[in-house]
């Protein structure tokens, strides 16, 4: 019996990916960043490049895993905190991810739910 020829499977390219989680509770984040990080942080993947934004004391450990790592302070954390207009949580979970995405040229992305 002769097998019918099949067209190769074609997939649409995936755009940037964003995950905001820690590596303890999120298997998705743990897969992308194989470092124990107990506090939530931002992970982005764009054009095959892996990038994170986290607390300063996690940057070196994440970078050792071969991932470009940036501290909150690069995205205005100290200035926003000094303004006193927002809570630390709002700054870390809302303001800084937006600033990081803008700096990394990410306008739209697939996000983990």
Image: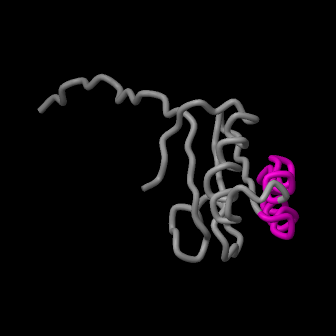
Residue placed most toward the observer, 95 or 5: 95
Task: Examine the structure image and report whether residue 58 is included in the region drawn in magenta.
Answer: yes
Q: Residue 38 at x, y = what percent?
A: 66, 77
Hey, which residue is sitting farthest left in the picture? 1
Q: Quadrant of the N terminus?
A: top left
Is 53 positioned to the left or the right of 90 in the image?
Answer: right
Residue at 52%, 37% in the rendered image: 109
Residue at 86%, 48% in the rendered image: 74
Q: Main secondary structure of the magenta part?
A: helix
Q: Is residue 106 above or below residue 45?
A: above
Q: Which residues are magenta?
A: 55-81
Task: Examine the structure image and report whether residue 26 is included in the region drawn in magenta.
Answer: no
Q: Residue 51 at x, y = what percent?
A: 73, 48
Residue placed most toward the observer, 43 or 5: 43
| Tally of numbered discs | 0
Residue at 73%, 35% in the rendered image: 104
Residue placed most toward the observer, 89 or 32: 89
Residue at 59%, 30% in the rendered image: 107
Q: Residue 82 at x, y = what percent?
A: 85, 58
Q: Would residue 66 be visible to someone looking at this image?
A: no
Is 62 positioned to the left or the right of 20 in the image?
Answer: right
Residue placed most toward the observer, 50 or 75: 75
Is 81 positioned to the left or the right of 23 in the image?
Answer: right
Q: Would residue 80 be visible to someone looking at this image?
A: yes
Q: Residue 9 at x, y = what percent?
A: 35, 30
């Amino acid at each position: 019996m002769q097998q019918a020829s099949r067209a190769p499977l074609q997939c649409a390219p995936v755009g940037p990916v964003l995950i905001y989680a820690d590596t303890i509770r999120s298997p998705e984040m743990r897969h992308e960043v194989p470092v124990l990080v107990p506090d939530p942080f931002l992970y982005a993947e764009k054009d095959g490049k892996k990038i994170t934004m986290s607390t300063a004391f996690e940057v070196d450990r994440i970078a050792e895993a071969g991932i470009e790592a940036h501290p909150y302070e690069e995205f205005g954390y100290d200035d926003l905190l000094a303004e006193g207009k927002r809570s630390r949580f709002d700054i870390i979970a809302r303001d800084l991810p937006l600033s990081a995405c803008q700096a990394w040229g990410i306008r739209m992305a697939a996000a983990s739910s």
